[in-house]
Amino acid sequence: MSDRPTIAARRWLFTLEAPNDTPDDAGGVSRVYASVATIRARLKDVAVAPSFRNDQQGQNVTHEIAFRSREGMTAEMRFRLAARVFQIVGLQAIDDKGLFTKALCEEVKP
């Protein structure tokens, strides 16, 4: 059975946002996100155990967002659904033709 999202399942309208880093006066950077595209996608809750690296908690996958593939997507981008923010942890092709992609995401507090 294919994991490709049906048209009916792609009922959520997400805003895809890309990071825009600008230098600040303290020698660091200030990160803001800019809207790149509006994407219709499927949202699915998933339960993945927390990961730990070097005694620090890593990113947790809390949701899958499946959508029609688009070029240029990276794990630094994020999805926004109204006030909810989903940071991309990883991207996976769903089908052999590369028509659909699944983003493994962690919902974060804005």
Image: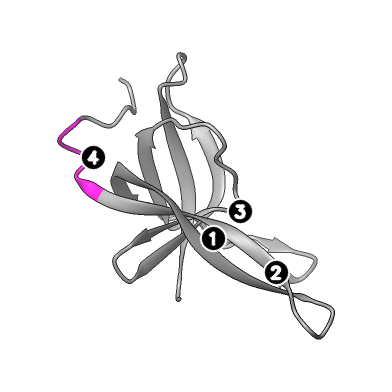
Q: Residue 25: x and y, percent?
A: 79, 84
Query: Which residue is the site of mark 4?
Result: 10
In the image: residue 61, left or right of residue 15: right
Q: In what element is the residue under mark 4?
A: loop
Query: Which residue is the site of mark 1?
Result: 60
Q: Residue 20: x and y, percent?
A: 62, 62
Tag in front: 2 or 3: 2
Q: In what element is the residue under mark 3?
A: loop
Mark 4 to mark 2 CA distance (whole Å): 34 Å
Span shown in magenta: 7-12
Dots 4 and 2: beta carbons under 8 Å? no
Quadrant location of the N terminus?
top left
The answer to whether 29 is drawn above or below residue 96 in the figure is below
Tag in front: 4 or 1: 4
Q: Which of marks 4 and 3 precedes in the sequence? A: 4
In the image: residue 92, left or right of residue 85: right
Q: Residue 40: x and y, percent?
A: 28, 42
Mark 4 to mark 1 CA distance (whole Å): 23 Å
Under mark 2, the amino acid is Thr
Query: Which residue is the site of mark 2?
Result: 22
Query: Which residue is the site of mark 3?
Result: 76
